[in-house]
Amino acid sequence: AQSVSQHNHHVILSEAASLELGCNYSYGGTVNLFWYVQYPGQHLQLLLKYFSGDPLVKGIKGFEAEFIKSKFSFNLRKPSVQWSDTAEYFCAVILYNQGGKLIFGQGTELSVKP
Amino acid sequence: EAGVTQFPSHSVIEKGQTVTLRCDPISGHDNLYWYRRVMGKEIKFLLHFVKESKQDESGMPNNRFLAERTGGTYSTLKVQPAELEDSGVYFCASSPQAGPTGELFFGEGSRLTVL
């Protein structure tokens, strides 16, 4: 079965540290890839997405992600985190033949210490 | 523009009782999705409506769950009778277009606790 795996359940960083959250998926066909974020007390919102083209995509708030097809990975990065980045981050894929049916990873909780 | 709204935000019920969760999608969005997150696990797809029709209900756990979207506007998800393992956060999302490129807009979720 198709699945999405996020390597870290909880990451704790100090402000200004660099961030990389791992995401791997298991599906051999065409996929579209997403990172969603849920800030405390808020709804899930889209951080960035990859459909095609440049495998390095930039999202909101200085986040970026790189799609590496050979590794089935879509890791999220940010050079310097801020306290306001404290949130839970979800990697997700949509299989190309299934409309709108997101398959999520388990989520990574990021805590940034001021 | 109003986002996706869900009600109630939190419901606590006893095993065997019935709960109905409601979702109001963004106006004009034909696609409506229900997802669920059981504590500590991933967010899982439950079903997908296109207007009032169920497009995909492959994620519905069992026949204790009933989803409706009468008139193609708001949707309800009823759990009857509720069991302990139904506890979790139920997310609703809507989208103006289906397919792999459609961005989903999520509500804040309805937290269900079954005692």
Image (cartoon, rainbow, N blue to C red):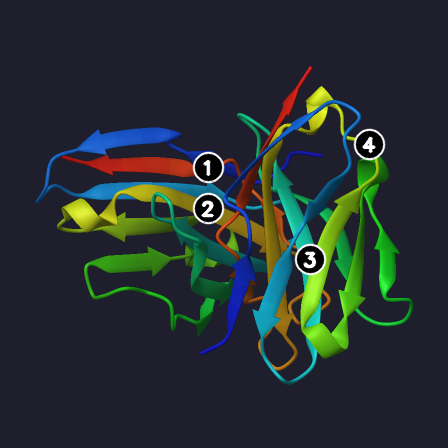
Foreground of the two, B73 or B14: B14
Badge nearest the viewer, 4 or 1 = 4
Q: Is residue B41 above or below residue B108?
A: below
Other residues around mark 4 within 10 Å, as few (<14) / some (14–19) / many (≥20): some
Q: Do labels 3 and 2 touch, CB within 8 Å?
A: no
Badge nearest the viewer, 3 or 4 = 4
Type of amino acid at the residue the image marks with label 1 = Gln
Spatial CA distance of label 3 from label 1 is: 23 Å
Q: Is residue B8 left or right of residue A96?
A: left
Residue drawn at x 35%, y 35% as measured from the top left: B111
Spatial CA distance of label 2 from label 1 is: 8 Å
Q: Do labels 2 and 1 touch, CB within 8 Å?
A: yes
Q: Chain of mark 4?
A: A
Q: Chain of mark 3?
A: A
Spatial CA distance of label 3 from label 4 is: 21 Å
Element under label 1?
Answer: strand
Q: Looking at this rendering, what residue extends furthest in the right direction?
A: A54
Residue drawn at x 50%, y 75% as measured from the top left: A2
The residue indicated by pointer 3 is A34
Visible residue check, residue A97: yes
Other residues around mark 2 within 10 Å, as few (<14) / some (14–19) / many (≥20): many
The residue indicated by pointer 1 is B6
Element under label 3?
Answer: strand
Q: Quadrant of the C terminus of chain B?
A: top left
Q: Position of residue A65 (x, y in %)?
A: 79, 54
The residue indicated by pointer 4 is A80
Foreground of the two, A83 or B76: A83
Q: Position of residue A11 (x, y in %)?
A: 58, 36
Residue drawn at x 54%, y 67% as measured from the top left: A101
Q: Residue B91 has which mark?
A: 2
Q: Do labels 3 and 4 touch, CB within 8 Å?
A: no
Other residues around mark 1 within 10 Å, as few (<14) / some (14–19) / many (≥20): many
